[in-house]
Amino acid sequence: MLKGPVWRWDIAAYLFTGGLAAGSSLLAAGAGVTGRPGLRRAARLTSLGALGASTYFLINDLGRPERFHHMLRVAKPTSPMSMGTWILAAFGPAAGLAAVAEAAPLLPRHGLPGLARRVLPRTGDLAGGAAAVVAPALATYTAVLLADTAVPSWHEAYPELPFVFGGSALASAAGAGLLAAPLGETGPARRLAVAGAALELAGAHRIEHRLGLLSEPYRTGRAGRLLRAGRALTAVGVAGALLGRRSRVVSALSGVALLAASAATRFGIYHGGVASAKDPRYTVVPQRQRLAARGGTVDPAPAAEG
């Protein structure tokens, strides 16, 4: 009855890595403002690495990957995919330049001219700020992309999906920061882990309970297992973030748990939507309920002219 998504697992991975890139860019900007160079460096490099991975997953899923550049020939505000392409085009160079700037202090003095050594860090700060401005759009546009389809359990979850994806992006970035940054500079990452987890869990809970019949695909099957695993890992990650302030090992384990939780949530949302498209019940029953709510009548078709 409804043609399901033709996307492969690459898109679910893209949802995760794109969010990680966006959240890490925001964390890097905050670390730079508060004077935490180690956390800033870890977050900027994570952002660039995740961006590279997300670009690969997105291009690899296209039927003709070599034609990816054709997506830049138009800008269509009503198309989330078109807008997402331009968001990536704006975010990528800024995040890349910010990450490259982190290498300047590590180069030998004779390997970089003095002017470039002084200018590159400042340029990196400007680029990092620009990436942080675009980051919220990168973190949440994929939620709009899913909700804009006819897939029942994605479409009806349109109010919550941006909050789930935004919170997941923040939590995953916090996890990467706890894993890679110096222990003494991880305070912002710990606070971000709590905020991101709260946003993600609240949105996911509403999706699993507010949609009536269309919540069912998120509670059963593969999607249900993934989302339950995501909740458990989030709880472990937040607990480790709060209790492991003085332990490098606990902080690292907390970071791994938060990253895994974010991935499980993204894959769970993906599989929940796919499951709802495969079963005609999730298309037909809500339609009948809407018809009954209108009094059981259908608007008559307009008379043919002539």
Image: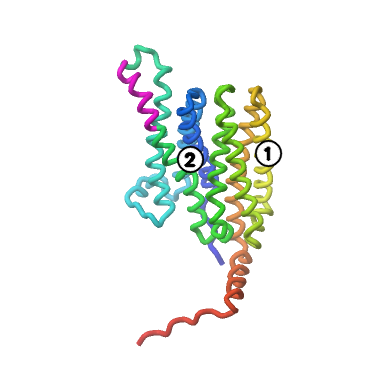
Considering the image in quadrants, where does the N terminus appear?
A: bottom right
Q: In the image, residue 235 lies at what x, y percent? A: 68, 39
Residue ID for mark 1: 235
Pick whichever of labels 1 and 2 is earlier in the sequence. 2
Q: Is residue 282 above or below residue 250?
A: below
Q: Is residue 36 above or below residue 8?
A: above
> Is residue 59 located in the magenta-colored stretch of the structure?
no
Closer to us: 284 or 59: 284
The quarter of the rendered structure image containing the C terminus is bottom left
Give 275 or 193, whichever is nearer the viewer. Answer: 193
Q: Nearer the viewer, residue 35 or 112?
A: 35
Examine the residues drawn in magenta and state their main secondary structure: helix
* 1 or 2: mark nearer the eye: 1
- Is 117 a magenta residue? yes
Mark 1 vs mark 2, CA separation in Å: 26 Å
**Pointer 1: residues within 10 angstroms few (<14), some, or many (20+)?**
many
Q: Are marks 1 and 2 in contact (CB under 8 Å)?
A: no
Q: At 63% from the left edge and 27% from the top edge, which residue is drawn?
A: 251
| Residue at the far bottom in the pictured view | 306
Q: Which residues are magenta?
A: 114-127
Q: Residue at x 66, y 27 (%)?
A: 244
Q: Amino acid at mark 2?
A: Ser
Q: Amino acid at mark 1?
A: Ala
Q: State the residue position of label 2.
A: 54
